Image (cartoon, rainbow, N blue to C red):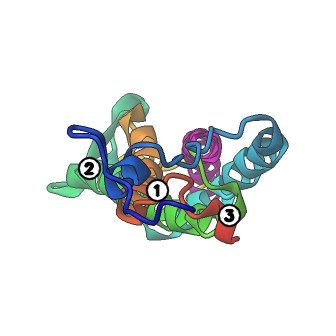
Amino acid sequence: MADSSPVQARPGAPGPELSAVLFTRRPPRPRVVVKADLLPAVSLLSLIGVLGIPLGWVWSLLAPPERVRVFDGGQLIPLQLESWHRFDDLAIYTLLGLGAGVVTGVAVWMLRERRGPVIMIAAVLGGLLAAWLGVQMGVAFANSAYAVTTTPNVGEVIERAPRVESMWVLVAQPLGTALAYGLLAGWNGRDDLGRRLG
């Protein structure tokens, strides 16, 4: 005859609830995808880099020229308070680059199936390339807009084209991209940044 008495647990032995907690398998943490994201990252870097051309064009329209007076020997002396426009040129480009970087970071974050450090690095490097290309093209656009076609006379006031006198402006766009992307990644809170939901 079968024994119907309840099975007694040994003292100190884990109960079923504790053993279920101790021996449950956790899903593996997702790894960084490098190979699959490499070609899209290069394409993204190139696309963001090309966006420096319209950025430079917008800067050439917004940056104020410096009014200078022509003196003997071709010496150009700025009029009173006009030398402040040199700072204005830097500040305008920095703000444009920072804004473009934030927009780029948010737009790249929307590529849900490609989220991760590879795409973020590509976006930041693309922002650096765009900032450099924007400076080069912006100065070229400004020089063509404010070109002096005739030799100025002594005492004449002319407008000198805007220029970027510090290369520190190149930091603004990649910094904006990294900050926007990093804040969105931190806000996400998923191990895979939501790639599997894409």
x and y percentages locating residue 194 in the rendered image = 58, 64
Q: Magenta segment, which residues?
A: 117-144
**In front: label 2 or label 3:** 3
Query: In the image, what residue type sits under mark 1?
Result: Tyr
Please provide percent x and percent y for residue 39: 84, 42
Name the residue carrying label 1. Answer: 181
**Considering the numbered disc 1 on the image, is that residue within a helix, a strand or a loop?**
helix
Residue at left 70%, top 71%? 198
Q: Is residue 34 above or below residue 55?
A: above
How many C-alpha atoms fall within 10 Å of the one at disc 1: few (<14), some, or many (≥20)?
many
Considering depth in this image, is 29 or 109 the residue closer to the camera?
A: 29
Cα separation between marks 2 and 1: 29 Å
Of 104 and 36, the residue lying toward us: 36
Residue type at mark 3?
Arg
**Mark 2 or 1, nearer chain start:** 2
Are there few (<14), some (14-19), or many (20+) residues within 10 Å of tag 3?
A: few
Q: CA distance from mark 2 to mark 3?
A: 47 Å
Q: Is residue 93 left or right of residue 122?
A: left
Question: How far from the left and from the top, in percent, is residue 79?
Answer: 22, 53
Which residue is identified by label 2? Answer: 87
Asked which secondary structure carries label 3, the reply is helix
Indicate whether residue 143 is drawn in magenta.
Answer: yes
Asked whether residue 159 is drawn in magenta, I would say: no
Q: In the drawing, what numbered circle is on residue 196?
A: 3
**Foreground of the two, 26 or 181:** 26
Q: Earlier in the sequence, mark 2 or mark 3?
A: 2
Task: Choose the circle earlier in sequence order: 3 or 1.
Answer: 1
Q: Is residue 10 visible?
A: yes
